[in-house]
Amino acid sequence: MHPEPPLSGTPSPPETPVARVLVRLRDAANWISGIMFVLVFAIFNYKIVSRYLAHDEPAWSDEVSVILFVWIIFWANAFLVRDREQITFDLAYRPMPDGIKRIMAIARVILIGGIFLWALPGSLDYLAFLWRERTPVLSLRLDLIYSCFGLFMVAVVVRSLFALRRLLGPRWRDAL
């Protein structure tokens, strides 16, 4: 057997203080999402045990599990899942020469980032409005529960700006 070559996407150690801070922040975000998954697993098991052994079904467990799933999805997509790791349909993108790929990538970043930037004020306004509404069981404020969506939208806009900067810079091929 031959040893496997290193993955091309394996990150090199950070070289600047800013890069080191970003790596630590990403690690913290990873830990937070992992803790949320552990909580979902623990709540799920608690619900099973309480339902079948104690013949009692805690109403709060479904609500907390759903809230955690919403947070996991938006948290991970905001801070952990890189653009290259997203599911894409790249049948038209892959066979193109690098120059065309660059144009397509710039168009994609402007389109996605622009749509999220355009929708950001209205979405944040609606999230702020949700302070009036509460969850049915635990009476938690919906603005706090769905604030992860606001974080996600801001992260998409910021990541789009950084991606556009990379695509317009001298080392744009690294961003493809």
Image (tube, rainbow, N blue to C red):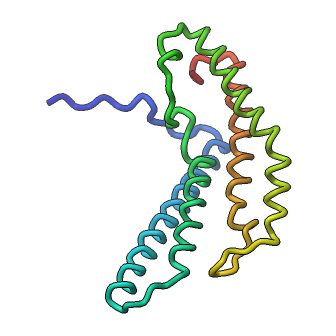
Classify the position of the N terminus by image quarter: top left
The foreground one among 133 and 81 is 133
The foreground one among 145 and 34 is 145
147 in relation to 78, above or below = below
Position in image of residue 77 (x %, y %): 59, 47
For residue 173, what is the image quadrant?
top right
Query: Residue shown at 70%/32% (left/top)?
Result: 112
Position in image of residue 30 (x %, y %): 52, 55
Query: Residue shown at 79%/39% (left/top)?
Result: 117
Position in image of residue 94 (x %, y %): 48, 16
Relative horizontal placement of residue 58, taking residue 116 as reference (left or right): left
Relative horizontal placement of residue 38, taking residue 21 as reference (left or right): left
The foreground one among 21 and 158 is 158
Query: Residue shown at 57%/58% (left/top)?
Result: 28
Q: Which residue occupies the extreme left position in the image?
A: 1
Q: Which residue occupies the extreme bottom position in the image?
A: 54
For residue 139, what is the image quadrant?
bottom right
Query: Residue shown at 79%/65% (left/top)?
Result: 130
| Count of numbered circles in the view | 0
59 in relation to 153, above or below = below
Classify the position of the C terminus by image quarter: top right
